[in-house]
Amino acid sequence: MLSVRSTLVVVLLLLSWAKPIRAQSETTGGTGPSADERPDLTTNLQDPVVELQRVQQRRDMISDRGDSLFYTSPLTPLREAIIAAEQSLYESTDIRLGASDNHLLQGLGDALPGQDEFGMSSFLILTGTWDGWRKGCPDQGEITCSVEGRWNYGPPDPVALGAAGLGTTLFTANPFTTYTPTFLVRNLFWRQGSREAGWRYRIGRVTPDQFLASSRHVTPLDTFLPIGTGAFVIGLPDSGLGWIGGLYINDRVNLAAVVHDANANRFDMGHLSEGDLFTALELQVKLLPRTKNAGYSKVTLWHSDGTADGQPLNGSTGNQGWGIYFKYEQELTCDGRLIGVGRWGRSYKASAVFERLAGAHLIYYDPFHSGRYERMGFESDVVGVGYDYGRAFNALRDESDVEVFYRFPLFPETDMTIAYQGIFNPGANTTNDFGSAVSLRIRSTW
């Protein structure tokens, strides 16, 4: 009987020989986040391609509507000058730049004695793309680079705060942690293809946890904060050398695959020469779309050889193993403003950070868009409620949390989010059966 890894390798070979069916272009509308005219096989906001698209989307939103609590900010003139310079650069060099700065202040309730109750950190993303090779053609080629900076302000960052103060294994904030050194190159890859071509791939320094099992409606920079909303029931390697590609089968079905260095480390170049690989295959399907912006439900099958030294790294515990992940995403209203997302994953042979992970989330865009409350709200605010359940590797017990948040445009270029989390039976703490966290998140794009 074929092993999981052998099965994945065979499927990847078949993918390279398959002739895809040409698919229609995917366009976007006004219900929630959207991509540009060249959507990729992922919708994760931390992915550099998606991040750059979202920065451009926010610029267009400001130009079209200018909808925010305050119509201008002290930084508006600076932002407008930066955007004008970036546009001039793109017109002359085909280099597109964008940036976002994300800040989180978090306070804990029911913290363990002697532990900090407050934490704050920042997360800066600088992204650039050169798209001058066969520009405008279906097989257009691009070089993409992203630099991340993460730092705190004295007290612990929110990731460490929740782990130490509450003993949570689902964490209270991801990815608001600290880097040493502060700035790192997370991605540097060649990207080619399009939906029109029927295929697309990346090769170079890539980040699988920014790609696999993603949902544009469940992202820690934009909506829900706990790490349990991510896919860390997959033994995900870190940023490093690898290949990500896929086929656009038709306008409702995509097939994606990953082959990556299992020893990859965002702080160095990894150890591809060791021969340890992480492989994954992901089927993406629009099951019951109600608008043209409907998201994909996904099934992800993966295998990891583990790390060469058997030590944990990113989503991997260092052990060899495999697993499966399901995500069901559904528009619940005809206008696509109310979205439901359900997730379940299982890892085997103690190979991922989580042995089991599940969640259910509701996201409602423009909640005051119609009816008698229309004049009270914004055109781009969001409210959400979510539930996560997880059993972490070597945890003392199963853990769950609930989260509610409201996000609204504070300034034309800035969103503010207020969130509350309730944590039940923290996985690394049997002293307290409940803890809580209140968060204030600010995200600006440039």
Image (cartoon, helix red, strand yellow):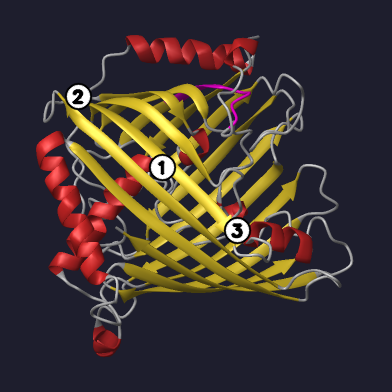
Mark nearer the N terminus (3 vs 1): 1
Q: Nearer the viewer, mark 1 or mark 2?
A: 1
Q: Is residue 364 above or below residue 377?
A: above
- Residue that badge 1 annotates: 47
Q: What residue sits 58% from the left and 15% below the top?
A: 272
Q: What residue sits 60% from the left and 16% below the top?
A: 5
Task: Check if residue 247 falls in the magenta segment.
Answer: no
Q: Secondary structure at mark 3?
A: loop
Mark nearer the N terminus (2 vs 3): 2
Q: Amino acid at mark 3?
A: Pro
For label 2, count other residues whose C-alpha is less than 10 Å away and answer few (under 14), some (14-19) or many (20+): some
Which quarter of the figure is the N terminus placed in?
A: top right
Q: What residue sits 82% from the left and 43% below the top?
A: 394
- Residue that badge 2 annotates: 197
As drawn, the label of residue 170 is none
Which quarter of the figure is the C terminus placed in?
A: bottom left
The range drawn in magenta is: 257-265
